[in-house]
Image (cartoon, grey):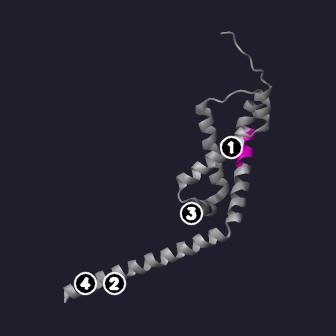
């Protein structure tokens, strides 16, 4: 009798897990379809938040270097990028951040996209570009 009860309990638990995973999978499929349908809204939100964070970080951290035409040391630049990613995560909040993580697959991919966004925006910085272009090319004698 005890073996029958334990067997029924095991079958019930396995059946419950099967139902849970099926429902969860269906939810993720619907969520993925929703994200595909509303992709332009997600990208617009991403662009707005990333640009806002870039502007804040640029004004606080990078403007001095751009105006003076100085090159940032690699360790300082990495720290600035970390600040940018942290600020983006704070601006998103937990709910929107989860949506972006779902959209990009995982947190590491989202961070990679943010770092690339930062690099692109920084490389296209007009003040930096004008400053670098204004430095004369000098050919040193060999």
> CA gap, disc 4 to disc 3?
38 Å
At x 49%, y 74%, the residue is 25
Q: Residue at x 69, y 51 (%)?
A: 50
- Determine whether 138 is above or below 90 in the image: above
* Mark 1: secondary structure: helix
Label 2: which secondary element: helix
Mark drawn on residue 12: 2
Which callout, 1 or 2, points at the residue further toward the start of the chain?
A: 2
Say few, some or many: other residues with alpha carbon within 10 Å of mark 2 (under 14 / 14 to 19 / 20 or more). Answer: few
Separation of residues labelled 2 and 4 (CA atoms)? 9 Å
Which range is magenta? 53-59
Do labels 4 and 3 touch, CB within 8 Å? no
Circle 4 sits on which residue? 7
Contact between labelled residues 4 and 1, with CB atoms less than 8 Å apart = no
Q: Is residue 21 above or below residue 113?
A: below
Q: Which callout, 2 or 3, points to the residue nearer the camera?
A: 3
Is 17 situated left or right of 120 in this image?
left
Which mark identifies residue 40? none
Q: Secondary structure at mark 3?
A: helix
C-alpha distance separating marks 1 and 4: 60 Å
């Amino acid at each position: 009798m005890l073996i029958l009860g334990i067997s029924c309990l095991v079958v019930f638990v396995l059946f419950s897990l099967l139902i849970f995973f099926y429902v969860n999978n269906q939810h993720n499929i619907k969520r993925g379809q929703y994200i595909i349908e509303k992709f332009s809204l997600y990208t617009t939100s991403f662009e707005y938040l990333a640009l806002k964070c870039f502007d804040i970080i640029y004004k606080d951290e990078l403007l001095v270097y751009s105006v003076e035409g100085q090159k940032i040391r690699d360790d300082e630049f990495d720290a600035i990028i970390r600040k940018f990613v942290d600020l983006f995560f704070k601006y998103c909040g937990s709910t929107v951040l989860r949506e972006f993580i779902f959209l990009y697959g995982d947190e590491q991919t989202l961070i990679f996209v943010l770092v690339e966004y930062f690099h692109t925006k920084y490389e296209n910085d007009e003040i930096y570009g004008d400053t670098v272009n204004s430095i004369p090319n000098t050919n040193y004698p060999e």
